[in-house]
Amino acid sequence: MKSLGLITLTILSLTICMSSCSGEDGTNGVDGIDGTNGIDGENGVGFDELTKYGYATMKMEGTRPDNLAFTDSTSFKFFPVGANFLQVVPPDFPTNSVLFSQQGPDTFHEFGIARFLSAPDDFYQNTGLGLFLNVKNLGQSTQSIEFAYMNVVNYSVIGDDNMYFVINDGFSSAPFLNAEVADFEFSNIAYDSTTQILTLSYSVSVVALNNSSGNDLTISGTVNVTLLEQITAP
């Protein structure tokens, strides 16, 4: 019993001391100055190689399948450097190249562009944007778009309410395989044959029946890419 009494007395003494020593609340001190931001880390291995050939942006405006209006923007900047993506077999389009051809007095530029949302692989990271464009007499008064094709692959539109739907559609300016016909507009098309840099702005209008949202959809964006030319034997 003596030990229990001593423990009780000790607890009582500590309680009285904490109460009497607490004092009145004082005024809060002034916040200190924020420290200097740290230095940005280095890009991961492979990042520079996969992004050095430029990017394509995309903005979508329309109505979701649940009839709520939405706007979504992103940038596709990753390009697969493997030869299996460069050497394609028709009717597939090249992913990062330009082809020239001459038909009488007319010159044709065929641009093939593909970019991915993240470092691509065969299955898990295959979200991407593809664009193929055949331009007649580029930069001349007779310039015209002979054919255009766009493919939006497995792109998730995620809303602020944590609801999403997926766009996985192909569009073309004329009937082509299983692609849906859409209205294309291109502006500020410029190609530098020395640097092989292509820049342009685009807009695509798609009716409700021809896209995954089930409503009229507008897709627009810009392209700024460095294209490749394959070396062929003479």
Image: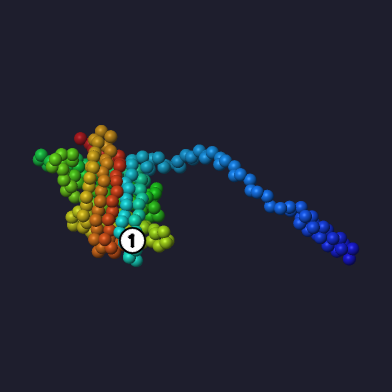
Give the colouring mode of the picture. rainbow
Up/down of 130 relative to 107, above or below: below
- Find residue 9 and report its horizontal and vertical position in percent: 84, 60
- Find residue 42 and report its horizontal and vertical position in percent: 47, 39
Q: Is residue 179 visible?
A: no
* Residue topped by disc 1: 69
Give the residue drawn at x 42%, y 61%. 162
What secondary structure is marked by label 1? strand
Give the residue drawn at x 39%, y 48%. 119
10 Å crowding of disc 1: few (<14), some (14-19), many (20+): few
Work out which quarter of the rendered image holds the N terminus and state it: bottom right
Give the residue drawn at x 34%, y 63%. 68
Name of the residue lying farthest toward the top: 194
Give the residue drawn at x 71%, y 53%. 24
In the picture provided, is 55 more to the left or to the right than 36? left
Residue situated in front as seen by the camera: 119 or 173: 173
Query: Looking at the picture, which amino acid does disc 1 mark?
Result: Ala
- Find residue 108 and report its horizontal and vertical position in percent: 17, 42
In the picture provided, is 141 more to the left or to the right than 124? left
Name of the residue lying farthest toward the left: 104
Work out which quarter of the rendered image holds the C terminus and state it: top left
